[in-house]
């Protein structure tokens, strides 16, 4: 009965998208194994799952799937778990004395829901007000991509992006809004294909209504080329 109660509790947490920490929960020995060792272990686990489902892995179309999935997990969609892949976000002196907010909008987000291991797909919008330093525009995209490439909840991803940029830029004046679709909602469970999830994190001056409103107005602009 205790096990059944725990299963029900875990499933309800997943459906409600409750996160447990603003830091990605990692074990102390998370990087004890090399990527190659992890791929070998995961490959066997994927093969076991597929065989348990009744699939014939001798089929040409399926025989390479366990290895492909293992490599994808370690080197691609969960590559952001490895701190060695953290982008180096070099800053530069704000010599042109630009004092207004800088907004980078419509940054593509590809992540994975940690509750069902299904895709999260959407857009991130970031802004900051310089405290004397600026960061290369592409670095903001890379920071989003780094934290997205791990099992995630959208709330945590939003916070992690803001915290990282606050540290890089040495300012609290950073904001992030993410609008994304979760396939764990769209393709299973309630199967609502129209709904999306919006999360936000505002630091420093962005907690002020006027500054926050200016940022939100910018990201509503319809940019076409």
Image (cartoon, rainbow, N blue to C red):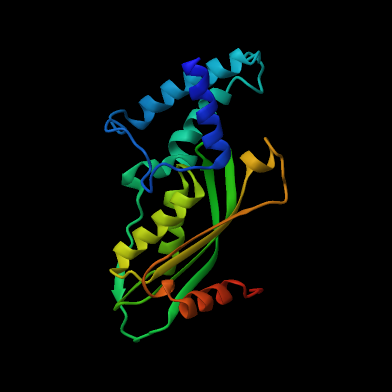
Q: From this view, report whether residue 58 is shown above or below residue 169.
A: above
Looking at the rendered image, the quarter that the C terminus falls into is: bottom right
Residue 28 located left or right of residue 157: left
Residue 26: give x, y in percent of width and height.
Answer: 34, 36
How many discs appear?
0
Image position, residue 118 (x, y; %): 58, 38
Q: Is residue 147 visible?
A: yes
Q: Is residue 31 above or below residue 135?
A: above
Q: Where residue 10 sits: x, y (%)?
A: 50, 30
**Image coords of residue 95 (percent x, y):** 31, 84
Specify the quadrant of the image occupied by residue 79: top left
> Residue at (48%, 29%) from the top-left corner?
70
Residue 82, quarter of picture: top left
Residue drawn at (36%, 25%) of the image:
37
Q: Residue at x 39, y 67 (%)?
A: 203
Relative to residue 10, is residue 102 depicted above or below? below
Residue in the picture at 42% in, 50% down: 147
Q: Is residue 117 visible?
A: no
Q: Give the left or right position of residue 196, taking residue 49 as reference.
A: right
Q: Nearer the viewer, residue 58 or 83?
A: 83
Which picture quadrant has residue 93? Answer: bottom left
| Left or right: 33 in relation to 55 | left
């Amino acid at each position: 009965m205790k096990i059944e109660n725990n299963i029900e509790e875990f499933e309800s947490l997943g459906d409600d998208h409750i996160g447990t920490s603003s830091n990605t929960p990692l074990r102390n020995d998370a990087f004890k194994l090399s990527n190659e060792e992890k791929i070998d272990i995961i490959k066997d686990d994927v093969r076991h799952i597929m065989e348990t489902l009744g699939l014939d892995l001798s089929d040409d179309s399926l025989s390479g799937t366990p290895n492909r999935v293992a490599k994808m997990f370690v080197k691609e969609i969960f590559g952001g778990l490895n701190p060695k892949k953290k982008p180096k976000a070099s800053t530069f002196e704000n010599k042109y004395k630009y004092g207004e907010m800088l907004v980078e909008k419509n940054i593509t987000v590809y992540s994975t829901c940690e509750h069902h291991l299904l895709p999260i797909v959407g857009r991130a919008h970031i802004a900051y007000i310089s405290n004397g330093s600026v960061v290369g525009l592409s670095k903001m995209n890379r920071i989003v991509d780094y934290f997205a490439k791990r099992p995630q909840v959208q709330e945590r991803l939003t916070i992690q992006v803001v915290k990282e940029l606050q540290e890089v830029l040495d300012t609290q004046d950073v904001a992030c809004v993410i609008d994304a679709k979760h396939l764990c909602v769209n393709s299973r469970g309630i199967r609502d294909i129209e709904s999306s999830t919006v999360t936000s994190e505002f630091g420093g001056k962005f907690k002020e209504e006027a500054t926050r409103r200016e940022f939100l107005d910018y990201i509503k602009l319809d940019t076409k080329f």
